[in-house]
Amino acid sequence: MRHVPEAELHAYLDQALSRSQCIEIETHLAACFRCQQERDAIAALRDRTTALLATAAPRRIAPLPYAVLAARAQTRRQRSWQRSAVWAASIAGAAIAGWGLRTALDPHGGPQPLSVAVNAAVAPPAESLSVATPVPENRQAEPIFLAQPPSGPRWSDPTVRLASGGSRPQRDGVQSSEGDSQDASLSLDDQWAPVSLAEAEEATGGLVPVVPDLPVLDVRMRWGDGQSRPLLIVTQQHQSGAFIHIVEGPVTTVAAFVSDQLQPGTAVNSSEPGRSPPDYMEAAGSVHRTSRVLAVVARLPVDSLNVLAQGVVLK
Amino acid sequence: MTELEHLYQTMFSSVVRFLYRKVWDQDRAEDLAQEVFIRAMAHNPEKPRAWIFAVAANLARDEARAAIRRRKHLTLLTNDHVTLVRPDAAADETMEHDEAMAQVNEALAALSQRDREVLLLWDAGMSYQEIAEQTGLAVGAVGTTLARARRRLVEAHDQNESGSHAARS
């Protein structure tokens, strides 16, 4: 007669066997006194183990409400996205910096550089925002080489392709010009509403990003989730004739937007992202902080865009 | 109620117990258990029960490594507890409980890592199949491992207890 192995009796008492295995063991147990004794001993050992482990248990376990835990998970996901967006923007900035540097150093690899001293025009004013990578002091004294502005009419910058064409109405604070009819935005969809400077200032509480002393040609605004400030794109014209676009908004949105604009073949560059005042939003009785950044996008070398970004002020 | 929420309601205490027997600190065990479920919400695993215990075991292992690095092992009972003067009955009861727990702790420490893991997973409510998937054992070997672990736990505990009595007398 084959007796039931010890491990099988453990599995039997732990209810880890199939129905047919259980029937087989029970049939044997009914006829085998030795296996009955073994089963009883294992049952006692099993109870003893359970009792010992129960001794080594925490006294009181008070789980948090599931909703609280879910909120924590949500917060962590948001932070993770923000970190990813900043990383993406930084990597894109670094790549663009390399491209811009190559363009500046290799006169045969791209447009002939035009020496334009822009220090006075773009020197950061006292209230300017700090950006991630400041330009070294010794760069301030040197002329900055900007890419040759496109030939042809002054307003036909190929980096900008206005969807609205010449139908855009005149807006307060936004300069009109003969070239306005050829102005173009960064392939924006209908969610980007053209607004006046005054409207943008009112909507943002006086936080419209501009480079001082450069004419504002266009202001576009897109509302976010209701509580946060709207996203803004302020288009200005540089002394070289090139259009520059200052994009300001929540870090993830700006990173995604800039990434979309930096497609191969467009020659559009972006400055490194700089901080702008965050949004503070109330939710579930607490205040949440959402980081915002700004970036200057244009068909200019990255060094020049970084200098321009340093000169941005909020008005 | 989602599946994960249901598991949280039914399994959280088991996960805390499982972790407690590894880190021997209730607050830390509860923190780690919360971390396990937060990660589960982010990953949405296909087999959440097995996934939860696998992550809990990994977290406990990381915790132990960190504790070793910091030279701050989380031990519940120290010599100070034994010599501590506790005037009231509740304190006496606490001391007895702590002492009993320390003996179980020592008995668990006497098991091999695999035996201890299988025993704790079984006590946390996992099936043989789930234990096998997590530990890499064959399902048929889980019973053998459990049989050995139970036997050794009781033997080690009885040995510690008799040693403790001998020391007192």
Image (tube, coloured by chain):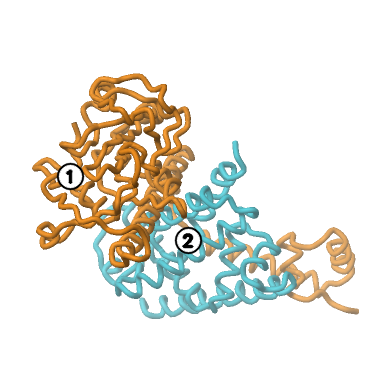
Chain colours: A orange, B cyan
Could you say which quadrant of the image residue A31 lies in?
bottom right
**Image side of residue B55 versus residue A171, left or right:** right
> Callout 1: residue from which chain?
A
Amino acid on which disc 2 is placed: Leu
Who is closer to the viewer here, A264 or A254?
A264
Query: Looking at the rendering, in which quadrant would you find the C terminus of chain B?
Result: bottom left
- The residue to which callout 2 is attached is B19
Q: Few, some or many C-alpha atoms within 10 Å of disc 1 (few <14, some 14-19, many ≥20)?
A: many
- The residue to which callout 1 is attached is A311
Q: Is mark 2 on a helix, strand or loop?
A: helix
Judged from this view, the residue extending furthest toward the front is A152
Q: Few, some or many C-alpha atoms within 10 Å of disc 2 (few <14, some 14-19, many ≥20)?
A: many
Who is closer to the viewer here, A210 or B101?
A210
The numbered mark at residue A215 is none
In the depicted structure, whether residue A223 falls above or below residue A131: above
Query: Looking at the rendering, in which quadrant would you find the N terminus of chain B?
Result: top right
Question: What's the distance in space between the residues labelled 1 and 2, CA to CA?
Answer: 55 Å
Q: Can residue B75 be seen in this view?
A: yes
Q: Residue at x 15, y 43 (%)?
A: A128
Image coordinates of residue A251 in percent, x first then y, are: 35, 44
**Image side of residue A39 versus residue B21, left or right:** right
Amino acid on which disc 1 is placed: Gly
Q: Is mark 1 on a helix, strand or loop?
A: loop
In the depicted structure, whether residue A95 falls above or below residue A261: below
**Image side of residue B135 versus residue A236, left or right:** right
Q: Which residue is drawn at 36% across and 29% down?
A: A221
**Image side of residue A185 versus residue A8, left or right:** left
Is the residue at mark 1 from the same chain as the one at mark 2?
no
Image coordinates of residue B81 in percent, x first then y, are: 29, 66
Image coordinates of residue B46 in percent, x first then y, are: 64, 53
Q: How many labels does the image show?
A: 2
